[in-house]
Image (cartoon, rainbow, N blue to C red):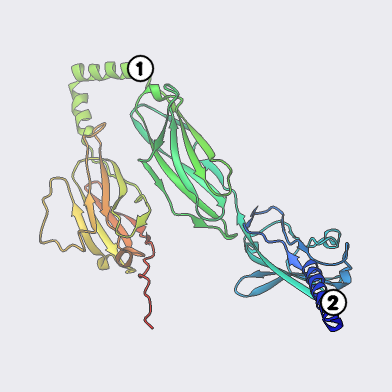
Amino acid sequence: MVYTQTTDRRFSLGIAVIFFSLLHTGADTLEIRRIDSPVEALLGHNVIIPCHFTGYKASHLDLSTVSVRWTLRTLEEELIYLFNGGQRVQNRSGSDIPERGLVEGDAGLHIPNLQIRDEGEYTCSVIVTPDKATSKVTLQLSGKPTCRVSDSSLVMNPGTERSVTCYVSGFYPAGAGIHWVRHSKESSNSSDLDENTCSKTPVPNPDGTYDVRSVLSVTALSIAEDGDVYSCVVGHRSLTGALTCNATLSVQPVAEDVTYIIGIISGILVALISAVLVVSYGMCYKKVPPEVSEIIECELIHTRGTKLACPIMNFRPKNIHITLYLSKGTKTINKYNKVDEWSPGRKENNDTPLLQPSHLKLEPFIPPPKNRLFSCFCAVTITPCLHEHNGAKLILEVQHEALKKPVSKKLMLRVQAAPVLDPTRTGTA
């Protein structure tokens, strides 16, 4: 009976020792508070990447027993900052861990004037001799864009057309959305403008940020549109709201007194001076060379059909000949491959060798003349193919009686394509 009581007491005492040991061990386990979401910050601003640790015994730490190591994962683990028993190593200029917070378990890393190279996954490793804890946190950076338009005031006459460009600069990362909105002064309504716009592909800057531009074609139909506002609206993850820059339309009527005077003078000349009429008639049919614009570039997506525009303006007579070539790095025009050709009233010639006419085709249109001058709204229909057209050079050649030699306009094609993933395959045992 005595042996049993002694055994029970020893067993109870052992259980108590193990219980209090477990409590003591749990209370003194070094841990770092977990951060689930990434830390977001703006380029050029300051940030504190958190690293709060608990589980040390003393109310205030003896820093001679503390080591904190911050690393950034790039191609390999890069040491950013090291605190080791009071000794500091700062590989990132300006980085710091204040001692005031460190003695109370705050090993947050201060980084000033953030740059794109500071973005990524950071690892905070804390040693309070002899215990160690490690935690990871992601720093996500954004750069706010700026916005401006080429003309803040669009002065136009009724029936005329003009383009305005929106320049968006200095944003990071590349994903920025741009759309145009028209605000009518007369009706107080707003409408999105999906047509007559062309947005380019973002272009990287040396500092890692991006620029992009969007072009809107504006047509003033009447005086009633005077005071309408065209807004370029920019969206980006760095913005809490949309960024907007505006262009105001000013429609000015043609002076009636000038039109009236011109009408009187024209009537007098027609009725009384036949000789002047003959001279005027001859001058009205004087040959005028065409004004050939650059080929307007738009975003080209693999296998997605689109149209490229090249306006040909103010020429006389109407007869004009347009030839379309495609070149892949050749330097002489004799090496260019003819794709299509067109002239008013010309029937298709099946004997003309064409290069993939289903992918590239001329679609010109000549409306009735204005002021006895013709214009050709020349469109190139293209279904881009990445392997065939990316990096190729498109050449539009214009021939006319008033030109001493043909005029050529060139455009380097840049075709984009979304990646295609192979289906996932499961291996057999």
Q: Position of residue 71 (x, y in %)?
A: 69, 70
Please tell me which residue lies in front, 34 or 106. 34
The residue pinned by badge 1 equals 256
Secondary structure of the residue carrying tag 1 is helix
Question: What residue do we see at 79% from left, 68% from top?
Answer: 23
Give the answer, above or below, for where 237 lies relative to 282. Answer: below
Give me the residue at 34% from left, 47% from top. 293
Q: Which amino acid does label 2 sit on?
A: Arg
Which quadrant of the structure image shows residue 424? bottom left
Q: Distance between the residues labelled 1 and 2?
A: 118 Å
Residue 195 quadrant = top left
- Is 394 in front, or is 382? 382
**Residue pictured at 57% horizontal, 60% vertical:** 208
Horizontal side of residue 213 vs 363, given as left or right: right
- Tell me the residue that label 2 is attached to: 9
How crowded pointer 2 is (Cα within 10 Å; few <14, some 14-19, many 20+) is rated as few
Expressed as whole percent of the image width and height from the top left, the position of residue 305 reads 28, 53
x, y percentage for residue 269? 23, 20
Depth order, front residue of 172/104: 104
Q: In which quarter of the image is residue 218?
A: top left
Amino acid type for the residue under numbered disc 1: Glu
Q: In which quarter of the image is the C terminus?
A: bottom left
Q: Earlier in the sequence, mark 1 or mark 2?
A: 2
- Above or below for 192 versus 69: above
Q: Residues within 10 Å of mark 1 (few under 14, many from 20)?
A: few
